[in-house]
Image (tube, grey):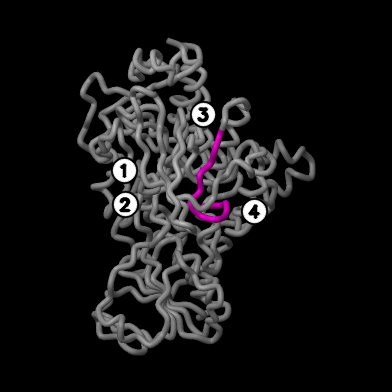
């Protein structure tokens, strides 16, 4: 049976996959396109996570697509609303029928002779193996394992008589009304779950080993609400998007340049939120601002829960679980009916896909990333890895634009394949995210691609610089190797219509 062939296959029907597909489909409507999604529904992260309070931690003016404005007075959006936004966008751009659901891609092999990828996938409901071929592959499968989160084993947890739940797999029928809840963790998930559960739970305690920086931020955009009364809403949206991108970048750069001053400023902000009598030991991280991502509390909901007494914080280490709760190293006991392990994600790059070149495995950790979107020596392959210090989708949009520009350059040259090649020994030996140190990335350093000393091999995590590099600078920068079809393939007629 002939394998289905597409000009472009996109892996993942989440925010990145649909956003990139919209950009490319609009620029190249005649290219055949397929989106392969492992889950049975669209939305990616925003379809998977269903825990109480799930929301974005970036403002929607910059987190949403620039080609589909998010018109809402709310700054942060709920998870369900983001999922609906992705589905609505796919429908508007006629992409809904291009998604192939329930397929887990296990391998992708590039043929240098045929100049195409062969993707092997398992249809998880039936166990059936399916194969596809494509000229170009774009991986938008995200950066973490959808099958399981990071879940360390706790001594004695088998003795606990209540429920132990990881937020990545929240039970739909969980009733926590009046229950004693302990949330283990201090990251964005914990900061979201604690105030959401505090409304109905009997008590909620956030148990942390070390604190995070938490910022209260307005949950409504009052500036845009005012401007909408006198200006067109599309213009107001553009202004809000630009304003928020500049603010985020300015905050990050200020934290890099004046870490001590910004630390004092943030701790003063937290002190104002929790009041003069609160023990600031619970909000004094050992690291500087933006060495890990900041946590957002819309309208200070997390701090309100603490001030009201509905929630509290314990900063300590776990000794063991007991039948009725958690015994801490200090000897204190936290009584619990339900324990939420908000312990983080398990990093899995590119959906765990094993890339092969002519049957040989690609050693990902020994390859450099090129312009933060392609991989050294790997042809016709791109991936979307967003920002650690800004909304993820900013990279998705300029990444999609770059791929369109790359296609145009390939068409102009009459070539079928292109790959980034390091001609100058740029490998620095550094991982692509070594300067960013949250636990989930530290645990995955040995799995991450490397970065170079400079130029397109250096990972900037800077939207402005990346935008110039991907959208404005010439595509042909001396690092790309454009490859015409091989004489063998042309002679065999395997690449009909390709330029010789």
Camera-nearest label, 4 or 2 = 4
Camera-nearest label, 4 or 1 = 4
Residue at the outermost right position: 230
- Dot 4: what SS? helix
Front residue (pair 448, 239): 448
Instruction: Name the N-terminal-most of marks 1 and 3.
Output: 3
> Which residue is the site of mark 1?
433
Question: Which region shows up in magenta?
Answer: 33-44
Residue 441, numbered circle = 2
Rounded to the nearest angstrom, the CA distance separating label 4 from label 3 is: 28 Å
Instruction: Name the N-terminal-most of marks 4 and 3.
Output: 3
Q: In the picture shown, does residue 185 fall above or below 158?
A: above
Rounded to the nearest angstrom, the CA distance separating label 4 from label 1 is: 31 Å
Q: Quick one: label 4, few (<14), some, or many (20+) residues within 10 Å?
A: some
x, y percent for residue 229: 79, 45
Rounded to the nearest angstrom, the CA distance separating label 3 from label 2 is: 33 Å
Residue drawn at the location 31% of the way across and 43% of the way down: 433
For residue 374, side relative to residue 96 (left or right): left
């Amino acid at each position: 049976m002939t394998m289905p062939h597409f000009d472009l296959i996109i892996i993942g029907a989440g925010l990145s996959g649909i956003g990139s597909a919209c950009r490319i489909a609009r620029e190249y409507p005649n290219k055949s396109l397929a989106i392969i999604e492992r889950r049975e529904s669209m939305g990616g992260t925003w379809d998977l996570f269903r825990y109480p309070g799930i929301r974005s931690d970036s403002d929607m003016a910059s987190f949403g697509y620039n080609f589909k404005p998010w018109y809402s007075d709310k700054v942060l959006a709920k998870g369900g609303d983001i999922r609906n936004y992705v589905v609505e966008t796919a429908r508007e751009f006629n992409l809904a029928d291009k998604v192939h659901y329930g397929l887990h891609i296990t391998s992708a092999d590039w043929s240098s002779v045929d100049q195409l990828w062969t993707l092997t996938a398992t249809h998880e409901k039936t166990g059936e193996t399916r194969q596809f071929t494509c000229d170009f592959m774009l991986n938008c499968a995200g950066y973490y394992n959808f099958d399981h989160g990071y879940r360390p084993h706790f001594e004695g947890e088998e003795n606990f008589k209540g429920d132990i739940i990881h937020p990545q797999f929240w039970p739909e029928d969980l009733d926590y009304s009046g229950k004693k809840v302990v949330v283990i963790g201090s990251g964005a998930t914990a900061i979201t779950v604690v105030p959401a559960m505090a409304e109905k739970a009997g008590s909620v305690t956030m148990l942390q080993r070390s604190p995070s920086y938490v910022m209260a931020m307005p949950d409504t955009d009052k500036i845009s609400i005012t401007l909408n009364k006198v200006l067109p809403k599309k213009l107001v949206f553009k202004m809000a998007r630009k304003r928020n991108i500049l603010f985020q970048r300015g905050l990050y750069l200020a934290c890099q340049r004046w870490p001590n001053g910004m630390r004092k400023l943030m701790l003063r902000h937290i002190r104002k939120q929790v009041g003069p009598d609160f023990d600031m030991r619970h909000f004094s991280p050992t690291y500087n601002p933006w060495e890990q991502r900041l946590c957002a509390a819309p309208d200070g909901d997390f701090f309100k829960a603490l001030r009201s007494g509905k929630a509290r914080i314990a900063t300590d280490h776990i000794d063991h679980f007991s039948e009725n709760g958690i015994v801490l190293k200090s000897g204190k006991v936290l009584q619990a009916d339900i324990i939420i392990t908000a312990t983080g994600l398990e990093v899995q790059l590119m959906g765990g896909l094993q890339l092969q070149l002519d049957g040989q495995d690609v050693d990902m950790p020994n390859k450099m990333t090129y312009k933060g979107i392609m991989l050294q020596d790997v042809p016709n392959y791109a991936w979307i890895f967003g920002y650690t210090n800004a909304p993820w989708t900013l990279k998705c949009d300029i990444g999609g634009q770059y791929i369109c520009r790359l296609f145009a350059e390939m068409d102009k040259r009459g070539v079928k394949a292109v790959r980034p090649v390091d001609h100058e020994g740029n490998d620095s030996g550094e991982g692509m995210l070594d300067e960013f140190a949250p636990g989930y990335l530290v645990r995955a350093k040995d799995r991450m691609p490397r970065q170079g000393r400079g130029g397109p091999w250096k990972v900037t995590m800077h939207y402005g610089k990346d935008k110039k590099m991907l959208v404005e600078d010439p595509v042909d920068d001396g690092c790309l190797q454009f490859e015409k079809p091989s004489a063998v393939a042309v002679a065999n007629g395997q690449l009909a219509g390709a330029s010789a």
